[in-house]
Image (spheres, grey):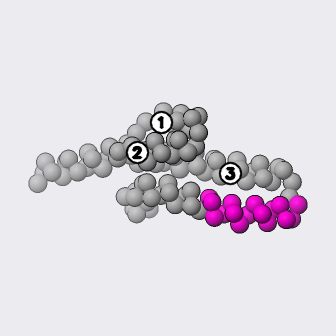
Amino acid sequence: MNWFQRHVNLSLGLYFFAGIIVTTILVPNLAHAHASFEVFLLYLLVLLGLLFLLDAWVLRQKGRSLYFLFFLLLGIGVAQIIYLCLSNNKQEAIDKALEQTA
């Protein structure tokens, strides 16, 4: 978990790439197997639910308020760009404390 805490933005990017890969593999196979619309809807809800939880985790790791989750209402892509541009307040506080002790 330590790697993910140090590389918060990469964690967010890895989730997107994993979601794209799983989607490109799973959705055509479900369509070929004549899966119902409910299966597609369930898959989409699970994917978006995991994204919401990951966004909340990323904001907490960056030391930001969970009110930033309201950016998801603008669109997932817009929100993700905003989250990537946010500075990491926790890491800046740790670095400042280390500089003062040195």
The N terminus lies in quadrant: bottom left
Q: Residues within 10 Å of mark 1 (few under 14, many from 20)?
A: some
The answer to whether residue 8 is above or below residue 59 is below
Q: Position of residue 89 (x, y in %)?
A: 32, 43
Identified at 18% across, 52% down, the residue is 98
Identified at 43% across, 48% down, the residue is 84
Identified at 40% across, 63% down, the residue is 3
Residue kind at label 3, given as amino acid type: Val
Q: Which residues are magenta?
A: 19-34
Name the quadrant containing residue 5: bottom left
Read off the residue under disc 1.
68
Most common secondary structure along the magenta stretch: helix
In the image, residue 25 lies in the stretch drawn in magenta: yes
Left or right side of 56 for 6: left
Q: Secondary structure at mark 1?
A: helix
Read off the residue under disc 2.
85
Identified at 71% across, 66% down, the residue is 25
Residue kind at label 1, given as amino acid type: Phe
Read off the residue under disc 3.
46
